[in-house]
Image: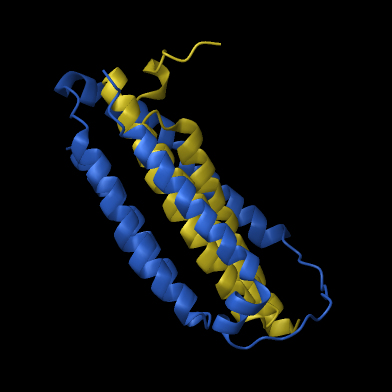
Chain colours: A yellow, B blue
Amino acid sequence: MSPESLELFRYFIIFIILLFITGVYCILLSFNLIRVLIGLEILIKAATLLIILAGYTCHRMALAQAMVITLIVIEIVIMVVAGGVVLWAFKYNKTIDPRRLSNLRG
Amino acid sequence: MTVRLVRSIMGLAITSAVLAVILYRLNSPLAAVFELSVCSGLISVIFITTVSFTQRISKERFFIRRRERFLKFLYLPIIIMAAGFLLVRCLQIPQFGLPAPAQVADVRLALWGLRHLDLLGQVVILIAGVFGVVVFFKEPDQ
């Protein structure tokens, strides 16, 4: 890894960590299932940027892009199913506040 | 439909678009196109469709929620700034080297040659997602 690549990696990793903190904060403190999904999306964005950055600094862009394409496919399936879960929760509970979803016992 | 949720979704779409520009600048045009079309477009459509099926809360609860949210997210910029300052001051990434694998320059060759099991996984995940959505929206038998 060249010194220029290392410097670029250092600058980007700061933003990736800040993006990760934002996503975790959003997931932990939101009481709305759609906002929780948005926080999860922010976490996935941080992972996407980290994969591409690793590929760029190690000069393996093709491999990194292939992994990001797989990640995007997984992301879209997760979001579609999670949207279905939110709609299902709203249909049966009339709320998307996870504190009020009291049908699950255990 | 809640305006604030739509604003959040638009913010997420803008974040995806900015990430797509960064990916393009980092020499990943194919990943940038996927990010822009799928993450910025399709996922926003899914979120807006989901939000359009939900209902708005009453005005009293709206003001209570807004105050609660302001108090909760008041600390986020402070945490972000403090973490950014600490990271800039303290982050020392060691020089590391990885074993050099076979270099593949074309993303198509990487996807179909090196990572062909990923394609199988993508197909399985897509089928699982389709079955999941079908199960969620299936009407119960009388």
- The quadrant the C terminus of chain B occupies is top left
Compared to A39, does B142 lie above or below?
A: above
Q: Position of residue A2 (x, y in %)?
A: 74, 85
Res B52 seen here: yes
Compared to B87, does A39 lie above or below?
A: above
Q: Position of residue A91 (x, y in %)?
A: 27, 25
Compared to A95, does B110 lie above or below?
A: below
Please name the residue shown 67% across and 83% down the image.
A59
- The quadrant the N terminus of chain B occupies is top left
Residue placed most toward the observer, B43 or B135: B135
Q: Position of residue A92 (x, y in %)?
A: 30, 20
Name the outermost residue toward the bottom: B105
Res A15 seen here: no
Q: Position of residue A56 (x, y in %)?
A: 62, 79
- The image quadrant of residue B3 is top left
* Residue B84 relative to residue A6: left or right: left
Please name the residue shown 48% across and 46% down the image.
B128
Please name the residue shown 42% across and 40% down the image.
B132
- The image quadrant of residue A16 is bottom right
* Residue B95 relative to residue B30: left or right: right
Compared to B92, does A81 lie above or below?
A: above
Residue placed most toward the observer, A40 or B114: B114
- The image quadrant of residue B20 is bottom left
Q: How many discs appear?
A: 0
* Residue A99 relative to residue B95: left or right: left
Residue placed most toward the observer, A78 or B19: A78
* Residue B35 relative to residue B88: left or right: left
